[in-house]
Amino acid sequence: MKDSTISRRQFLRNSLATAAVVSPLGAGIASAADPDPTVLGQGKFRFRAVKDWSFKRDSSPVEVDDCHEFVRTKAGNLILCTTHIANNLIEFAPDGRVIRTFGTTYPGIHGLTLANENGEEFLWLTDTKRRIVVKLDMKGREIMTLGWPKESGKYDSEKKFCPTETAINPANGDIYVADGYGSNWLTHYNAKGEIKDSYRYEGFDCIHGVAIDGRDAANPKLLVTSRAANKLFTLSLDGKNLGHIDLPGAWICRPVIHGENVFFAVINSGRLKWGSDFRGFVMVLDKENKPVSLIGGLPPISGAEGETGLYRNIEPKPFLNCHDVCLDQEGNLYVAHWASKRTQPYKLTPVA
């Protein structure tokens, strides 16, 4: 696609094409296809693309490259990270108006997490090219930088460390760093950046994302995505493995918790090997971590095995290598795309 406008038009054409898609019901998923062909998803999580939406400043789209992740600030704005070094970070309002851009020194910016410390917000990012984790204040000033965790004793060289995500415990400021593109260790730091421990379990394969799961306020946990293994792990905050669920065929990126649900961008689907045509869809889990909607995905056949039992896209595929999602206070869904010819994020609005 030559530009973001064409990409959005293609998205709408793809959405219209879903009218012909019919599939048996998957367990926990309310329906496989919607009577309205422009609607994606099932059950309570059904969305329609917002036509001709993109974030702009003075009527001109702000340039992006690989769009990796979003966060939402307490003021209700969204911040997107992109590897375009003219503007690694872009803050915009839900209506698409760009408020500011900042950051020019993070060519491999990948993970983006927002933390609140005594009412003050901070951004945590990972850079896979510089192999670092950085804490920024909201003016873009660097507060802390963490390099490869040599002191953990788990690495014999910096080259084996390539961090993809962070999670910050709001109770004590502890930091968890997922080494998703390196050696698959989850390194646990205290708020000062001192290593407390490291965790790695059988089935950790591209631990792409980590998040604090505070849905049970009395018993918070960690969610860790093992993307290449198509698994979601649950850990205690001190790193004990509490088990995992299998999501066959779903290469899930980082977990995004919204209310009692978990959202994932699924960058690759329906295959057991990393492919060249990713596209993907958005998966929604309920409070029991069971899939309830596949936005742009086709629910699996109940009881199916092998290839027919994999989570997969609808056809034609509506997204362009989706890598992360974010939701605003009104429930609108924003989807970021990786390696998609500088495609602007999509905005989808919920359907009642």
Image (tube, helix red, strand yellow):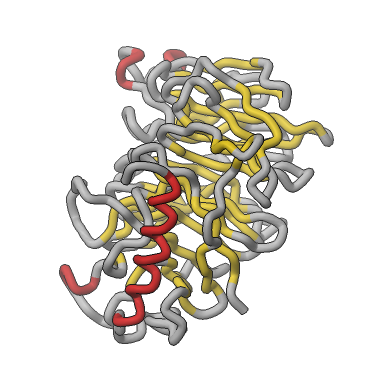
Tell whether 102 sits left or right of 5. right
Residue that protrudes farthest toward the front in the picture: 59
Residue 166 visible to the viewer: no
Residue that protrudes farthest toward the right in the picture: 119
Residue 47 visible to the viewer: yes
Q: Which residue is drawn at 74% across and 47% down?
A: 76
The image quadrant of residue 56 is top right
The image quadrant of residue 75 is top right
In this view of the protein, which residue sits in the foreground, 287 or 220? 287
In this view of the protein, which residue sits in the foreground, 325 or 242? 325
Q: Where is residue 322 in the image (x, y as percent from the top left)?
A: 40, 50
Q: How many numbered discs sit on the rendered protein?
A: 0
Q: Which residue is drawn at 63% across and 27% down?
A: 101
In this view of the protein, which residue sits in the foreground, 262 or 45? 45
Q: Where is residue 108 in the image (x, y as percent from the top left)?
A: 42, 24
Q: Residue at x 19, y 55 (%)?
A: 272
Q: Which residue is drawn at 52% across and 69% down?
A: 48
